[in-house]
Amino acid sequence: MARSRSPIIPAKTKPSPLNEATVQPLLIREVSAIAVSVPLTKPVLMGGGQRFDRSESLIVRIEAHNGLVGWGEASAAPSMTGENLAGMVYAVKHYLAPRLMGKNGLDLPYQILTMGQGLIGNQGAKAACDIALHDLVGQYLQVPVVQLLGGKARESVLTQYQLGNPNIEQDIAEARHSWKKGYRFFKLKVGVKSVEQEILAAHKIRKALGPDALLCADANMGLSSAHAHAYVQGVASCGLMFLEQPFGDEDIEKMAELGRSSPVDLCADESIHGINNIFECHKAGPIKGVNLKTIKLGGLIQTQRAAIISDGLGLCVDLASKTGESSIAVAALTHLAYAIPNLHWGLNINNHYLQTDLVDNPLQQVNASVACPTGPGLGVRVNEKLIRAFTIIPH
């Protein structure tokens, strides 16, 4: 009787330790702050009477000793972050850049933390630097930014389309046109027309698009208490997912009071300047979700942390770019949208409002979604000629 032979099991070997001498640091040798102003395809109206014809953004260019370049972007939003473009450029040149020079970009969280320690606030300026560092490190490691954020948590994201026209007929025409192009989620800008017109607009857009369209509304702090209460009751049958920021950024209790009787869920946007504000809104009670922007929270790392905390508190998350940010900022936000735990209230990106994007391969929304860029870093090819063409001296 033949004896069975035991299988040969190879001896376990320890992996060879990484030779530290072969790991080259990613030393930063130059940080540039560039102010740009790009015209929009059409004026955009916001709550409270704000009107935008151009997008003004800070572009940050970070170059390493090996010649790699990372790009970041943050829009100026004085009514949201308190920053204007001149101040953002100054903050980078005189406070943030000196803390990055000569440092190893591979220590990404550490560099972003120490960069910001010498400057209170200025979240937009910090966000542009944070995004540029992520782009630089992703290129060096030859991985997309989503991998630096922990990898994908979903296969697709739901994108929103903003409607902010002077009259109802224009809103309806744009909504129908966008529906044909594949959009399925629409954000109605309110606080622009009379409350009666905005209630009527919600009903007409719902009728024009049918029951399958997803609708929400954003007031950008532009409603009075009386108008907010009238609006949520007037659109109760329209099936809005949420109403965003009806009141001022510090009126959390006022918003909570509205939420206690509102048939429409409420979302906090301008009220969220940091993670502490998320806890404040949650403690207030009836607020059901938060709008997170990199310019409010200081970049990708802090916005991801805010999204994780929001998810843990049971709050829905809506990620958004500022109207008119180019595909540089939009790519960063899209990578983040694929990585965070929940994106129940969708992704709002707005590079399509630009007459000219600043990259050769702009991100495109297709069939109510946008693909996560697959190239290293942000995955977009920044066009430096266009950057120079739209560069301004901010005042």
Image (cartoon, rainbow, N blue to C red):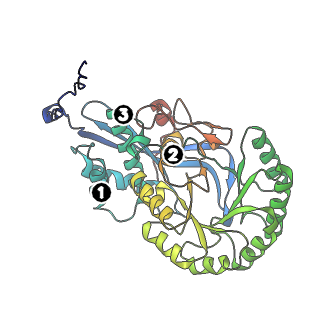
Q: State the image coordinates of residue 303 (x, y, percent, origin top left).
A: 45, 56
> In the image, what residue occupies the spot 65% across and 61% down?
50
Q: The N terminus lies in which quarter of the figure?
A: top left
> In the image, what residue occupies the spot 67% across and 67% down?
48
> In the image, what residue occupies the spot 61% across and 78% down?
256
What amino acid type is highlighted by mark number 1?
Leu
Badge 2 marks a residue whose secondary structure is helix
What amino acid type is highlighted by mark number 2?
Tyr
Badge 3 marks a residue whose secondary structure is helix
Which residue bears the numbered disc 1? 113
- Please state if 263 lies on the left or on the right of 90 as rendered: right
Whole-number angstrom distance, CA of label 2 to CA of label 3: 19 Å
Do the CB atoms of the residues marked 2 and 3 lie less than 8 Å apart? Answer: no
Q: State the image coordinates of residue 135 (x, y, percent, origin top left).
A: 39, 39
Q: Earlier in the sequence, mark 3 or mark 1?
A: 1
Q: Earlier in the sequence, mark 2 or mark 3?
A: 3
Q: State the image coordinates of residue 158 (x, y, percent, origin top left).
A: 63, 47
- Residue 72 appears in which quarter of the rendering? top left
What amino acid type is highlighted by mark number 3?
Gln
Q: State the image coordinates of residue 372 (x, y, percent, origin top left).
A: 52, 38
Residue sitting nearer the eye, 373 or 61: 373
Whole-number angstrom distance, CA of label 3 to CA of label 1: 21 Å
Mark linked to residue 139: 3
Q: Is residue 99 visible?
A: yes
Residue sitting nearer the eye, 181 or 67: 181
- Please state if 311 lies on the left or on the right of 221 as rendered: left
Which residue bears the numbered disc 2? 338
Label 3: few (<14), some (14–19) or many (≥20) C-alpha neighbours in 10 Å: many
Give the answer, above or below, for where 346 lies relative to 144: below
